[in-house]
């Protein structure tokens, strides 16, 4: 494993910025087919509070293993979940490469802020936190083998309808 | 029309990021001459709610057609509008190329969050939404022929004094 | 002194974006040793309100001169300050080059938003403002000789525990 110097990997970092911006747009636009295409077949996707993450507690707010599980989640949102309509806008910054592994996989992170607009109140900051990622390159494209969304909030206002 | 693959256009995307950051800074600094210089002579600039935008309703919160109209708007803010002083800070992320047209024009988008600070309360999230742009290159520089600012808010807290 | 055209300096700007993202991460992760390494030995670091900054008043919320002063500040936070635990997440955007000087130093700016999560309330926008920087290159790496953090807030909710 190589810990890359800060200044290096500018190109990889730029690629990760593009990936994160595309990821955010696909979810903001509720395009779940595009969302699942960011992950490998055997992916792990988790949403977990910082408290649980730091205490290494197993409880996740959302946990999906594999493409099928992601698609189930998306179908549940589209077809069965009952919730107040809302518009969600994600902003991603602080994209960083944490490690390059010999098998070509990449560890990376990014900060996210999620803003929610509902019909009866002001737009508000809904969630803030960090993506912790493990990516692999397949057919030239970086894919998420693992994305852990660690949110800083101690509680979740309203409910977490959409993935982060 | 070409729908570009996600991975392509990294250079154009970087250029658009720079443009959006410069745009935000010019408005944050109330430099309206710099702001109008981002647009073509025959530009269309609109601020519209997501509700109206999706319903294709014609009502815009702000609508300017052409440079003269932008300059009128700027003059009105500087010289005639009466409003409580405030500092506005715009953050732009999620810059994406949506389409490249054969005539060389570019369709692009970006997410914005606007934070407002007034003297008697905490800084707050004022607006959040998306820029939907059509750009053309003139003398080597990308200019906005059309910028539609679609805000997610269902209502506007205080009033929309400055352009987005 | 050269005022660079907007379109130029794309590479320098990309480098500054990486630097700002790394800076934010080091503070978000409370890694103060990494934080102080962004500054020159003879640095000036200040946090000041926009009101005081515009009126050229000398009062700063935080003022550190030189590496020793930065390290003192970090030690005070770790060892002596008493405050409610919180998680802070910084987002930086709007990175711009303002001037290139003949001695090789760079004037730059960026916008920041700081979100704070405490255990008994929703995550909230804590501060918003602008970094005004003077950087020099030492051993190939850009370092902050001066960073003035000008916050837009008219008041500071809770207290400013961590640097910006």
Image (cartoon, coloured by chain):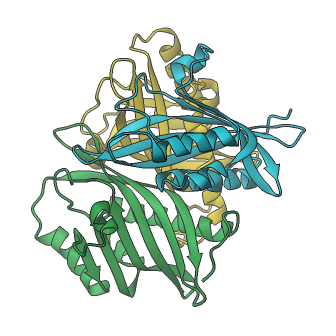
Chain colours: A yellow, B cyan, C green
Residue B5 at x, y percent in the picture: 77, 40
Position of residue C148 relative to residue C89, above or below, is below
Residue C120 figure quarter: top left
Q: Quadrant of residue C80?
A: bottom left
Q: Residue at x 37, y 57 (%)?
A: C129
Location of residue C51 (image quadrant): bottom left
Question: Is residue B118 in sight in this rendering?
Answer: yes
Viewer-closest of C133 and A44: C133
User: Which residue is pictured at 30% across the width and 23% down the height?
Assistant: A158
Residue lying at 70% horizontally and 63% vertically, measured from the top left: C7
Where residue B111 sits in the image (x, y, percent)? Answer: 55, 39
Q: Would residue A103 be seen by someone viewing this image from the given angle?
A: no
Percent coordinates x, y for residue B127 in the rendering = 43, 35
Pick whichever, B21 or B58, lies toward us. B58
Relative to residue B152, is residue B15 drawn left or right? right
Q: Is residue C126 toward the left or the right of residue A132 in the image? A: left
Residue A37 at x, y percent in the picture: 64, 33
Establish if A87 lies above or below B18. Answer: above
């Amino acid at each position: 494993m190589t810990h890359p110097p800060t200044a290096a990997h500018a190109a990889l970092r730029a690629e990760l910025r593009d990936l994160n911006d595309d990821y955010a747009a696909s979810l903001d636009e509720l395009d779940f087919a595009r969302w699942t295409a960011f992950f490998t077949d055997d992916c792990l996707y988790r949403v977990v509070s910082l408290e649980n993450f730091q205490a290494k507690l197993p409880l996740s707010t959302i946990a999906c293993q594999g493409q099928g599980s992601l698609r189930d989640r998306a179908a549940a949102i589209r077809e069965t979940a009952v919730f107040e309509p809302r518009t969600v806008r994600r902003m991603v910054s602080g994209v960083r490469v944490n490690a390059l592994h010999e098998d070509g996989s990449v560890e990376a992170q990014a900060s996210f802020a999620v803003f929610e607009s509902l019909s009866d109140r002001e737009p508000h900051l809904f969630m803030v936190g960090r993506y912790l990622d493990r990516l692999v390159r397949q057919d030239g494209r970086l894919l998420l083998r693992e994305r852990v969304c660690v949110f800083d909030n101690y509680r979740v206002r309203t409910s977490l309808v959409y993935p982060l």
